[in-house]
Image (cartoon, rainbow, N blue to C red):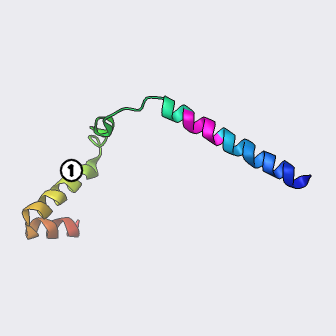
Amino acid sequence: MATNTSLEERLAAVEAAIAELQKQVATPQPNNWLQQITGSFKDEPAFEGVLAYGRAIRQGDESLLEAQDES
């Protein structure tokens, strides 16, 4: 009988998980993830450094890359 109880508990857990997944699917999610994060780094001082570093990489500017590495 212990095996049946364990099986019943496992089945109940699976049913609860399925119910939670169905609830998540039924709830509409925002379509554009980019709109959710736009502006989230605007007050972060290090973000300007990240942008400058990325710009230097794209432009192949070795002097900017060296300056970023030293700071």
The image quadrant where one finds the C terminus is: bottom left
Instruction: Residue at 48% x, 29% y: name it.
Output: 27
What x and y, as percent, mark residue 58?
A: 11, 61
Q: Is residue 12 above or below residue 48?
A: above
User: What is the quadrant of residue 38 in the picture?
Assistant: top left
Instruction: Residue at 23% x, 55% y: name it.
Output: 50
Residue stretch rendered in magenta on the structure = 17-22
The residue at which mark 1 appears reads as 48
User: What is the quadrant of residue 12 in the picture?
Assistant: top right
Instruction: Residue at 11% x, 65% y: name it.
Output: 64
Residue at the extreme right of the image, as rendered: 1
Majority SS type along the magenta span: helix
Between 26 and 58, the one lying in front of the other is 26
Q: Is residue 35 magenta?
A: no
User: What is the quadrant of residue 60 in the picture?
Assistant: bottom left
Between 65 and 67, the one lying in front of the other is 65
What x and y, as percent, mark residue 20?
A: 60, 37
Tell whether 31 sits left or right of 52: right
Q: Name the amino acid type tagged 1.
A: Glu
Tell whether 42 sits left or right of 24: left
Instruction: Residue at 56% x, 34% y: name it.
Output: 22
What x and y, as percent, mark residue 65?
A: 15, 67
